[in-house]
Image (spheres, rainbow, N blue to C red):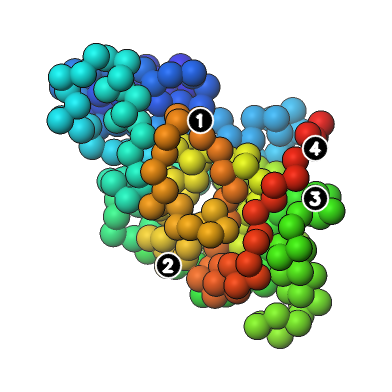
Amino acid sequence: NEIILSSLRSSGKVAVMASEEDDTPTWIHDDGPFVVVTDPLDGSRNIDASIPTGTIFGIYRRLEELDHLPTEEKALLNSLQTGTRLVASGYVLYSSATIFCTSFGSGTHAFTLDHSTGDFILTHPSLKIPSRGQIYSVNDARYFDWPDGLRLYIDTVRQGKGRYPKKYSARYICSLVADFHRTLLYGGVTMNPRDHLRLVYEANPLSFLVEQAGGKGSDGKNRILSIQPVKLHQRLPLFLGSCEDMEELESYGNVQQKVNPGYEV
């Protein structure tokens, strides 16, 4: 978090940074043209187990019409823009390779770090998520807390009785960036059906990427990018994936988990 903030300060290009690690957004430069929202280290609980982690970010233009407001107010309102106003987003995956995946609104592209030179090499130009996959990614230990619609969907596709007549497999890392990256490459759907993931700096940036790659991002009912944030750390269900898989999932009705007894792990 501190490294990102320091870099944005020195760039002179950023007015506001809003982070998962901070209670409120940080105002950086009065004349910075951009607003950055970020989850600096997604999956941080996995570090001790050497499981992949990542950084997620989104970039907006500063809303100049808010410049007359007090600093705290304009910092917050600049950070609460809908995902449809994103000018860029991306993530960095820290794994067996370091992958930087980004979109500026004209396709999704992934770069791989060459450790010998320090350069990121374009390895996945114009990524397109398959229209359908054969993988679902979710913590199904929560199965009995799910609504009937989600349970029926999972039961159906893993038996090969859905619209795609092959049995689906489960793949779940519990690192959002890692699970999303695999889904982006191979198709299917990755999800957290309860109000857990943050709209501003997790759901919006990844939904922007998946849409630019030809997929969909939803809360189970609504397009993520069209949801107006009302709080910086607002949480919601998140479903990301292939168009055909997402459409089939949403056809099952209620897939949002409302039962949340509290989980220790």
- Amino acid beneath label 4: Pro
Q: Which numbered tag is attached to residue 156?
A: none
Looking at the image, do the residues carrying marks 3 and 4 touch, with CB atoms under 8 Å apart? yes
Gap in angstroms between the C-alphas marked 3 and 4: 8 Å
As helix, strand or loop, the secondary structure at mark 1 comes to loop
Q: Amino acid at mark 2?
A: Gly
Mark 1 or mark 4: whose residue is earlier in sequence: 1
Q: At x 35% / y 31%, what residue is drawn?
A: 79
- Contact (CB < 8 A) between labels 2 and 1? no
Q: Residue at x 57, y 51 (%)?
A: 238
Residue 145, which numbered label? 3
Q: Secondary structure at mark 2?
A: loop
Q: CA distance from mark 2 to mark 3?
A: 31 Å
The picture places residue 225, in percent across and down from the top left corner, at 40, 51
| Residue pointed to by mark 2 | 214
Image quadrant in which the C terminus is located: top right
Which of discs 2 and 3 lies nearer the camera? The answer is 3
Q: Earlier in the sequence, mark 2 or mark 1?
A: 2
> Residue 233's mark?
1
* Viewer can see residue 100: no
Measured from the top left, where is residue 197 in percent x and y? 58, 40
In this view, the mark in front (2 or 1) = 1
Per the image, the residue denoted by label 4 is 261
Residue at point 23% right, 37% down?
A: 61
